Every structure is written in C-alpha cells, then in structure tokens.
Image (tube, helix red, strand yellow):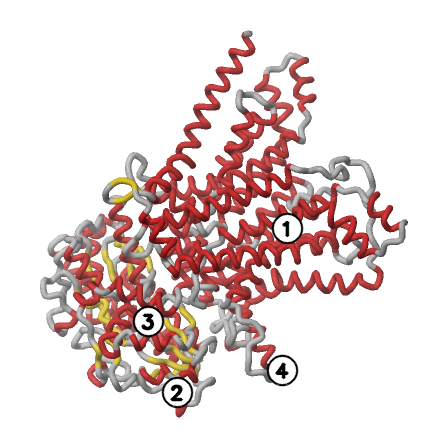
Amino acid sequence: MTLRLSRTWTRRVALVASLAVGALVSTAFAQDGRLEAAKKEGKVVWYTSLALPSAEKVAKLFEAAYPGVKVEVHRTGSERIIARVMQELKANIKNVDVVHTSDAGHFVFFKAQKLLTKYTPAGVDGFPAGFKDRDGYYYGLRATVNVIAYNTKAIPAAEAPKTWKDLLDPKWKGKMVTAHPGYSGVISTHVLALVNQYGWDYFKQLAQNKLMLVQSAVDPSGVVASGERPVAVDGGEYTFYQIKKKGNPVEIVYPKEGVPLVVSPTAIMSFAPHPNAAKLFTDFTFSREIQQVMADSEGLYTGHPEVKYPTDKPKLSDLKLLTVDPEELEKRGEEIRQRFVEFFGA
Amino acid sequence: MRLGARALDRSAVVWVGAALALVVLMALPLGWLVALSVSGEQGATLAHYRAVLGDLALRKAVWNTIVLAFWVGLGSVAVGAPLAWLTARTDVPGRGVIRTLVLASFVTPPFLGAFAWVMLAGPNAGLLNKLWRGATGSEDALLNIFSMPGLIFVVTTYTFPYVYIMIANTLALIASDLEEAAAILGAGRFAVALTVTLPMVLPALVSGFILAVLQALALFGSPAILSLPAGFHTITTQIWTFFHFPPKIEMAAAFSIPLLLATALLLLVQKRILGRRGYAAIGGKGGQRRTIALGRWRWPAFGACLVVMACAIFLPYGILAKAALSRAWAQPLTWDNLTLANFTFTFFEYGATRDAIVNTLELGVATATVGAGLVALLAYITSRRLVLGHRLVGFLALAPVVIPGVVLAVALFIAYTRPPLLLYGTLAILFIAYLTKEMPVGYAQSDATFRGIPPELEDAGRILGAGRLRILRDVTAPLARSGIIAAWCFIFIGVIRELSASIILFTPTTKVMSVVIFDLKEEGQFGAIAVLGLVMLALTFVTVAVVQAALGRDVLGVRE
C-alpha cells in the first residue's frame, strides 16, 4: 500500500516538475518560433530501447508539457531498432525523428552514413565526456550498468555469485538466464566489455552452464523475480532495481572486478520528418527534471551533473566501471552477435 | 457460335484479372525470391545455397524442424484420431462439449498457447511444476517447456484439430455396415475399430498427418517463444534472424526455398493419397451410422478427452486470465497480487495498443471482404465452368497453400521494397500477404458452398427467362449467403492471428496485434501480453459464433 502511494506521489511530483520545465522551455522555444513549428508538425516519432513503461512515461510527461505535440513511441531492442531504421531507409520510408538505443556503436555507424542531424540539446554542457559525441551529433540520454542478480528466495546471500567468474561454476548449471546481444544494446556492450576483460573463452565456458536465453536486457529481471531462473548473468541494473522496489525477492550484485557501463545515446535523424518537434522533445528529455525522473522512478544513471540519486543504490562514482569504445563496438558488432550465437545456440 | 464468342469474352476478362492478381500475389514475389537466392555480385551464383547448406548451425535448424514436424504429425494423429472416433462413433459423454472445445483449440493462436505454456510449465516458475514440487517434494521439474519435447507438446496441442477434422468428417461419411458385419462375426469393439474402421480411415489419417506436419513446418511464434530460450532454432526462426541487422536477405531467400519445396512435395503426396479414394464404403449418403457403446470405458474415455482439453484450453486460458489480473504472474492470485493495472497500462498508457487493434481490424475486415468476394467469384466461375480453363483457375486459387507464411513474407519483402511497387511500410503489403495466405481456405469453403447449390435451380430460372445476373442475385446469392459469410469469417480469423508473415513485413506504423504481442514477449511484459491475448481470443470467438449462426452448424464441418 505504501509502495503504491509513494509511486503515485513520485509520479505527481514528476508531472508538476515537468509542467514547470515545460513552461520554461516553452518560453525559450516560443521566442524563436520553434514551438509553433513543432505544434504545426503535431508529433515526434521516437524509436527507443528504453524499457516500455519508462518510455511511455517520458512520452506522457512530454505530452502534458506540450499539449498539441504527440509522441509516437516505438519501443523495441536496440539491435531491432537499427535494423528497422536501415530497412525503412532502403525502402525510402522516412518515419523516425529521434533514435535512442543502448548500442553506442549504432551512432558511430549512423554518423558515418551521414544520417544524423548535428544538434546540441539544451543543458548538456555539464555532462561528462563519456556522454558526448566529440562532433556533436549524439548525446547520452541515460546510463546503466550490467550486473548479476539473484532471487533471494532461491539463493541465500552467502551462496550468491559475487564475481563474473563465479558464474562459470558448474553448480549454476541450468539456473541462469542471459539476455541477447542480437536484440539488446545493453547486452552487446556488456559482452564486449567482458570479452575485453576475459576473452571469448569466458562466454564459451559460461555457455557450458546451459543458460536460458531471453532477448531484452529488461527481461532477466522478470525471469529472476518469477523464479524461473534464480540467477541473471547480465541485464540493465535499473530493471533489477525497479523490480526490487516493487517488492520482488531480487538482490543485485555489483562484481568488484567492475561493471560494464552502458551509455545510451540519442540523436535526431537527418531526414526527420518532424525536425522541430524532434528538437523540442530532445531538449525536454535532457532537462534536469526528466533526467531526475529517470534517476528517481526508473533507477537509471544520467550524465546530468545536478541529478540526485536514490540513496538505496550505489552512485556511479562508487562503482568500478568497465567502459567500451563506441567505435570498437561498431566494428565488432557482427563478431559479438555471431560468436554469442555460436556458443549459446540461438 | 454466338454463345462461344461470348464465353470467350468472359474468359478474357476473367483471365486478365486472374493473371494480374496472380502476378501481384505470387509470381512477382516468388520470382524475386528465386532470383535473389541465386543473385551474386557477378551474375547468377549458388553461393547462398552453399552458404546456408554448408553452415552447421543452419543444418541443425533444418534437422530441428524435421524432428518437430514429424513428432507433431504423429502426436496430432495420436490425439486427434481417437478423439474424432470417440465423438463421431461412440457414446462418450459430452460429445458436443468436446467438439466445441476442439474447435476452440483449432482457433486459438498457437503463439498464445505457447506463451501460456511458458507460465504453466516453465521448469521453475511454471505453475504445474510448482504444484508438482509442492505435492511430491521433488527437486526436479515435471515438465520443461523450453525443450524440443516441450515445443512438440505445445504445437501438437494446437495442431491435432486438423487431424480431428479429417477423421471426424471421414467417419461421418462411412456407414456402419462393415463394422456391424465384423461385430456379428464375433469381433470385439476394439478389434472392429482396429481391423475395420482404421483401414477405412487410413487415407484420411495419413492426410491429416501431412496437414499437421505442414502446420508445424510453417509455424513461427511457438518455436520463437519456446526454442529460442532453450538455444535452438527452427527454419522459420532462423529465416527471421536473417532480417536482423545487418540483414542477409539473400540467405533468407536461399533458406526459404527448401521449406517451399518440402511443403509442395508433402502436399503433392497428400493429394495423391486423397485422390486415390479406392474404398467404396465412402461417398454414399445411405447406410446408417450406429453409436458404439463404450460400456465401462465411457467415463475413462471422457476423462482422457478432458485431459486433452485441459492442455489445450482450460489451463492456458486460465493462466492467461490470471496473468492479466496479477501484478506478478508467478505469484498466487491473492488480494495483494490482484490488479487492473495491466488493463489500464495496455489500453491507456501503451501507445501501440490502439493502433495495433485498429490496424488488425482494418486488415481483417478488408482482407475478409475482398477475399470472400474474390473466392466466391472464383468458386462460382469454376463450379459453373464459366470460362475456359476453369480448372486452372481453381488450382491457382489453392496454390498459395504451398507457401509457408514466413517464406511468403520474405518473397513479398523482396518484391515490394523496390520499384515499381513500393509497398513496404504500408498496410497494403500486409493485405497482400494475408489475402494470398488465406485464399486457399476461403476458396475451399466457397467451392464447397457452390458445389452444394444444384445448378438445376439456376437452370429453372433461365428457362423462365431471367438473365444470369438476375439469377445470381435472386437465386444463387441467397443460397450461397451463409457459405460466403463463413468464408469471410474464416479469412478474418486467419488474419487477426497471423504472425509468421507479419513479423517480417511490419513497420512501426503498421503493427498488428500479433506483432505487438511478440514485441512485448521479447521484453517480458507478461501482463500486457495476457490482456492483448484475451482481446484477440474474444475477437476470435465472437467471429466463430457468427459463423456458427450463419452455417447453422459448427465450423469443424462435420455433417451430423
């Protein structure tokens, strides 16, 4: 009951906050006439890999702040998004305005293909370097880390795996779940980070433990919470955090060797059919208030220096982070997916 | 002479129309499919075939598909045939109810069934496994749905109705004389069934087996939901992954051809078997069909039917309803866990729901209306032999049945992402896919309708001086109406559950319900899937009720 109350409360605060910032941004926009232009366009089309309920929430907040501009949310996995964008382009379909995935390699690729609009959202000056493209085409909207998680009803804390290598122990055979780098950018980033750390041998050995394969980096949290598999070997930390907050028996482990950091960029496409609405929306998502919503109710990390984080989870600065170079991620994307399938079977 | 010339005119119009439709629906896509599968940088090449056949993982996918299809075929016969015999020939209690439930299983989208069985028989969180552990204290799972046997089980559960229909329809036509003769000569009930009835239905049995195999071969949703988590592919899921980034459409094309050929070959075999109806016992309407008394086996037989129905209907529907109403699907449905949040999320917060439902209904109505009109026209033309080469028209209307949905989608994708017809990204490409895919079912239904209307009535009208159009309006159409409504509904049901072609052809603006459900599955949003699944089932059952009312009998087509 208290949980439900507090969630409604958070939502209300967030809404009020967004309305306030909406008003602020509105004035800035109104001055150069872009708000009118955005309203004339009527909507912004957002291909996003942000977990569905979170994405819909951001969209609703935007629509509340800017009546008259709708957000069309198309949520799917990062790797599905790039496939979709490229397929549509090939068929000369220009549908998407804003693309947001968790595979930074995609944006290296898009940039090289000249598919991005150079646009610096308001307020990103204070963001750390890891959140900014040096040429100004894309910016990190949010970040998460990959973690291990386990079901506390099935596994006592003392026995839970503590490190990435612990997961190779045969005692976990048939008890673990992984998401898929062929679907999720969070996971493709994760795989590359661990390959750089331990080599492909790590995944070859991990596969010996007969993991359950799911697609989205959101899904392992659900699988662990339901008890279908007691241990998740990867997955976005924010999804575990959210599901734990809802009262599920889930505990998160941050391996001390380091956790792969996933910064998820966003960019406006060069062919965006609603460029003004796209800019308005992009600015909105980088505003302190929305970045704060992502931290509060979604459990995400952000690049915004003024965002305050919940006290019941570690700060990004407390964690040892394993980072990957977007260019390397782009170059080795195909290798990551192929070898993963080779080891895990599908 | 004058008559001949008019027939030729008519033929010309029909043939030009049919040829155009054929080009758009089949020739162009399949032509592109073949062309792309052999296209290389420097002219024609077999490199793609070498690549797909030389790849160990892909060969494994082929093998998995063969294993799946074979066992589903056998399993469907093992379940469907006895069930058909029980309801058609014996005094097993609740025959009407059992038939209704077989029908329900027939129209349940298999991917929904697969999804429900994840919640029932996931090795750890699955409800049945939890009950099993609770009851026996065992550590191990009773059932592991994420396995080849699990997949075979689920697919069989929703495929056996094909065998049931074949057998029940055949049994309804076979008189009991021979069976009685055997009984008089001293054979027991089961000896009669085995030595007399079985041989008479054997062609139907083999034919049903092949139908079931074809279903299993073409299926996408159930393997994607059950085999991918277990780390194995089938041909259909593998073809789908060729569309992931970076796409390998040539490989998809090359991998589609063997599936296409296998389907065509199996259908040819089936046609041969059915065509050789040498057994004289079938055909006449005379003869009586007497009910066999099961005696003390009555209730055990009923129990067996119940078990089948529990697997196909009660358990899956129950768990879907539970998931729709729960915060956490794996927890017991206590007050704390009870919620309407899944409904509010699905209908009011999740933006894709409304568009998907609208798209699905639009496509369903459009395809069913155009399709029912088209098949009615074609069936009228062929059954009244109005044009030259009417047999060929009939054959072509049935031809798409050899194209599995995924293969059709690959072909349409290749053909319509390039000029002159850039249809990818519009509902039109889905419309074409659905129309092509549902045409054979609709045509078969319409053909039966028109064959059931004796031409004598029309001739009588002609003699009385009415023109063909007036007769069509005043005589034929009223008689054919219920049959055409049924065709409409069959097509509609087929469209709203379609996944295997849609999953390749959709774009974000043309999502349909099945695709949205699959999307949600990939993200693990169980509550919303359950809600949308229930909506889909409700739509389906309303449509079925309309058919039943139109036909005045149940849609399984068994004449009592």
- Residue at mark 1 to residue at mark 3: CA–CA distance: 57 Å
Judge if badges 2 and 4 mark residues of a common chain: no
- Residue at mark 2 to residue at mark 4: CA–CA distance: 27 Å
Q: Residue at x 41, y 48 (%)?
A: B256
Q: Say left or right for B94 vs A50.
A: right
- Tag 1–tag 3 contact (CB < 8 Å): no
Q: Is residue A73 above or below residue A129?
A: above
Pair 3/4: label in front = 4
Pair 3/2: label in front = 2
Q: Which mark is residue B163?
A: 1
Residue for badge 4? B136
- Tag 3–tag 2 contact (CB < 8 Å): no
Q: Residue at x 27, y 57 (%)?
A: A82
- Across and down, in percent, residue A176 comes to 41, 77
Q: Say left or right for A131 vs B560.
A: left
Q: Residue at x 51, y 74 (%)?
A: B330
**Amino acid type for the residue under numbered disc 3:** Arg
- Residue at mark 3 to residue at mark 2: CA–CA distance: 37 Å
Q: Residues within 10 Å of mark 4 (few under 14, many from 20)?
A: few
Q: Chain of mark 2?
A: A
